Image (tube, grey):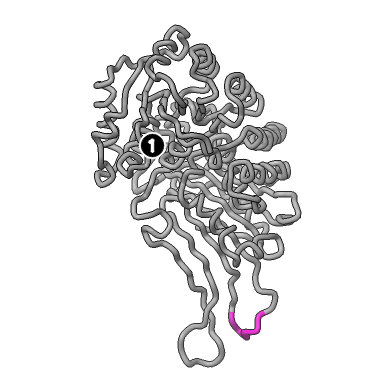
Amino acid sequence: MRQAAGTLLLFGATGDLSQRMLLPSLCALAADDLLPEGLRIVGTARHGYSDAEFRNFAREAVEKFLPAQRRGRMADFLNRLSYQPLDATNPEGYRALAEKVGGGDVAIFLSMAPSLFEATISGLADCGLAGDGTRIGLEKPLGHDLASSRDINDAVAAAFPEDRIFRVDHYLGKETVQNLIALRFGNIMFEPLWNAQHIEHVQITVGETVGLESRAEFYDQTGALRDMVQNHMLQLLALVAMELPVTFDAGAVRDEKVKVLRALRPVAAGESVTGQYRGGASGGKIVPGYDEELKAESDTETFVAIKAHVDNWRWKGVPFYLRTGKRMPTRVTEIVIQFRPVPHSIFAGARLKANRLVIGIQPQEDVTLTLMAKVPGLGKGMALREIPLDIAMPDALTGHERRMAYERLLLDLIHGDQTLFVRRDEVEAQWSWIDRIRARWQEEGLTPKPYSAGSWGPSAAIALAERDGVSWHE
């Protein structure tokens, strides 16, 4: 781990992500006395704010998006803030930015359009803000395919080596995602069973109840496959399927993840389903269809279901069912590990159900393991029933205060710990698999099937799993 940065430089400091996540996360870290002593936070964007105006902007964002009980030491947080206006495309502005930042080690967080990355990196290099004491965090999207991703990474690599590049996937900052690693490798009972001999299949679901909201233009150019599967879902799959790292450090963990991503079998014909929501009921309200929200016809998918395979020794023959969509019945992110049934039942007449481990990531962060147990009583024989071992106490997995994912990620960026960030070869392996799926869709002329808002997607997605005798966990 590197020395902690003395300055955090936030690009896009007046944008939506900064208001909702970055500034509230930093305030929460300050309240818990987790920020390094003396850390300065410099915001920059096009807005012509003074230091005082930016502090007022930050205070309003924190009061809106951070719970009141987590706003301690607000004055300390605000006093750390300063601001420098900058047009990222104007090279002349970077000198003034460098003067504002001053010397010492600097952590930079880019929350801006990828189209601005090249100009920004060039400006940072020219003004001396890309030296050995500087590390840089990149917010997604990092391209829309493998070629564009490489272009972005090449632009960043022109000034920053890989060990100073921190690619953000905010799912990796969630407590329960990190607990997945602890669950697998910190408990002797799971690792011996975590393979094709004992696991029948794996399900990963990311359901959203929202529609386009303010992301219409971006989303219509992106779609569910690139917006959710390429990054969040493949990272979850890699954490489920990876081998035991030698140590829990950035290099070892990411080495094992990339092996899984490279072992993904190309998706065959009939192993993927796409959908697009139509009008329906969501959250007790009547909502319009995708084309109505977009105010144009489109063949962009808002739902994807995929049957994936990891072609290695551990997972041979185990399907991974991935499902994500907008306007789903509930907002949920979960991983389901379905174990195989016992090979022989000694309980005459009892209907045994195979054990299932459900790891809830959002909105509830919990872990449930279903087991078979005897029904209490003195009836004839041994009647069995399924019971849950449920770890759902509010502070069991998340602590007494539920933290935002960006708290962990910003803190790790400041301290230079890359473990929960994505390496370039991971990104490229993810894009390589996604590009092959899109190419197959084009070859097959696959277009999204309609589904009603408030449902779990088109019926073909149900059939994708049920033809293997599998039901989606709902």
Answer yes or no: is residue 268 visible.
no
Q: Residue at x 66, y 24 (%)?
A: 147
Q: Residue at x 52, y 60 (%)?
A: 358
The answer to whether residue 279 is above or below residue 49 is below
Q: Is residue 188 above or below residue 79?
A: below
Residue range highlighted in magenta: 345-350
Q: Is residue 325 left or right of residue 438?
A: left
Q: Nearer the viewer, residue 121 or 95?
A: 95
Q: Residue at x 35, y 31 (%)?
A: 38
Task: Identify which amino acid the numbered label 1 is placed on.
Answer: Pro
- Crowding near the residue tagged with mark 1, few <14, some 14–19, many ≥20 C-alpha atoms within 10 Å: some
Q: Position of residue 40 (x, y in %)?
A: 36, 28
Q: Is residue 339 above or below residue 128?
A: below
Where does the image place residue 376, in percent across and percent down from the top left? Answer: 46, 85
Q: Position of residue 281 (x, y in %)?
A: 39, 46
Q: Is residue 348 magenta?
A: yes
**Vertical arrangement, residue 92 with respect to residue 445, above or below:** above
Instruction: Looking at the picture, tell me which residue is in the foreground, 138 or 343.
Output: 138
Q: Main secondary structure of the magenta part?
A: loop
Magenta residue check for 361: no
